Amino acid sequence: MTRRARRRPPGRGRLPGRQSFRHAAEAEADHHRLVRLRSTVLLFILAAAMLGLAAQLISLHVVHASALEAMAERQQAGRLTIAPARGRLLDRSGRPLAINVEAQSVYAVPSKIPNRHAFARAVAPVLRLPPAEVASRLPSNLQFAWLARKVTPEVAAALRARAPGDQLGFLPEARRVYPNGPLAAHLLGFAGIDNQGLAGAELAFDGHLRGRAGLARVERDAIGRPRFETRDILREPTDGADVVLTIDQVIQHIAERELDSALAATRARWGAVLIMEPKSGDLLAMATAPRFDPNAFARAKPVEWVNRALGTIVEPGSTFKIVLAAAALEGGVVDPHEVFVSTGELKVGGGHVIREAHNRRFPRQTLGDIVRNSSNVGAAMVATRLGKERFYDAIRRFGFGRPTGIDLPGEAPGLIPPPSQWLGSGLQTIGFGQGISATPLQVLAAGAAIANEGVVIRPRVLRAVRDAEGRALEVATPEIVGQATPRVVARQVLAIMEDVVTRGTGTLARIEGYRVAGKTGTAQKPGPDGRYLADTYIASFLGIVPSDRPQLVILVMLDGPRGEYYGGAVAAPIFRTVAAQVLWHLRVPPSAVPEPAR
């Protein structure tokens, strides 16, 4: 049996032919073409990428270079306003009334606070705020959020102990402080959280006190907080100037202490004691009560901020009779020795009848007696003879019906209706200070005009402005407003006012060793319906001392004293107590000439 021959695989055992070499060459050529294609594509991609990168670099470094630099500047560096030191308020002797102290202001970094509600619960008790309010100030997308401005060192330390350092930041700032607390609060006013004047002298002289802010360039850390050690000063701040006021801290304290005692004794609603130098117009004291503490002015009601000495109008009552007397003497309608006969009442237009208080009777009176006895019927008789036009002209020359022009904000003009509106008994009631309205400061200024021989001086509280080295930048000088009445008439009225204190309604204002001139006032208060309220009065006393060489004009006014309410009974004693202490403090020698005989 023969074996079958095995088939040989193709190509095995056989030398390659021409066809095989051709196929191998074609495959190798295809491979090289593929490599070249891939290399070309890769080169194109790399070239495109390089071109794109080059374009981006050109865009960043050329086209948008300034914008990007500004963005980087904002992120890494910023400009910081440097607040200047606010100028001080000083009394006339240089004693500080308003100063600055360093305080810490606290801010949070919300982006670093993982749980804002837990953070709020931790710090809210220290800030004395509801936790919900603290949490509402912490949006997570912010790098900066104020928590509290100008806190005490104790509060700052408590906050540091309750929150991590990267969640809180502290900035040093200056805080306005009034070292005497409520003393002269209404006159001084107060400054806001950014040291801007908001009321009183702080507002009136804000241009001098504020100064000019500086500018600095600072770097910021990774979370945007300024790094003060890298501060670069671009513009130095200019500190505010010191303002020297006319008030005397000691005299202001005397006035406020005695006023507080009077309010406690009489249970009056409010009161005022004003003290002025008649020749210069300098206010030595402007005390009104109740007061507030300017260190915590936000805790007081806005109505308590009102300076009643110049912002509240009242009917002046019988203190206004000095204006009537001056007008009658100047107009020549009354002879000083003429006697007015009265039955105790006077019928006037519109069927009105004017009577004396408590039905008193003064059968025979001169003009001096009318003022000394504070006779309403006598004043009505003089006003009738004087007439509307002449009386109105004198009232305006004394400064009533318009602001005095004092260098403080918030002054009211008062209310003096034109003569055409003096209907019925209007002329006669205005003669004894009812039916018109004035501020306490206007009444004081009228008394100063009598003390200053008829010359009206503008009241002022600015004495000087000084720079940080104490050099005077501005010095205030007395400003004459006008002539209220001739010199001889002013002297006559002053003599009549002396008689009021010597043997009239103002005897409780006498001061041992000094000649005193004054005038009492007791005015009924009108109600909302225009009718006068029963048993509600404004009690006042206007005094000049020493009257032989006037150094001080003092007004005491109480609104609604309980019990005794006559000005001679409740206001004159306050004048005496205040004036005696102020005369001693100023070392004013006693009067060389004794009280004139009457």
Image (cartoon, rainbow, N blue to C red):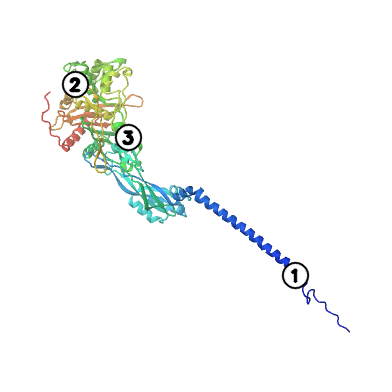
Dot 1, how many residues are within 10 Å of its Cα: few (below 14), some (14-19), or many (20+)? few
Q: Is residue 354 above or below residue 150?
A: above
Pick whichever of labels 1 and 2 is earlier in the sequence: 1
Amino acid on which the number 3 mark rests in the picture: Val
When asked about the image quadrant of residue 366, the answer is: top left
Q: Is residue 223 above or below residue 16?
A: above
Percent position (x, y) of residue 299? Answer: 35, 42
Q: CA distance from mark 1 to mark 2?
A: 145 Å
Q: CA distance from mark 1 to mark 3?
A: 115 Å
When asked about the image quadrant of residue 459, the answer is: top left
Percent position (x, y) of residue 513? Answer: 12, 32
Q: Nearer the viewer, mark 1 or mark 3?
A: 1
Q: Secondary structure at mark 2?
A: helix
On screen, residue 344 versus residue 81, left or right, reads left
Q: Secondary structure at mark 1?
A: helix
Q: Quadrant location of the C terminus?
A: top left
Dot 3, how many residues are within 10 Å of its Cα: few (below 14), some (14-19), or many (20+)? many
Pick the front one: 528 or 593: 593
- Spot the residue most to the right: 1
Pick the front one: 79 or 536: 79
Q: Which mark is residue 258?
A: none
Q: Which mark is residue 306?
A: 3
Where is mark 2, residue-wise?
489
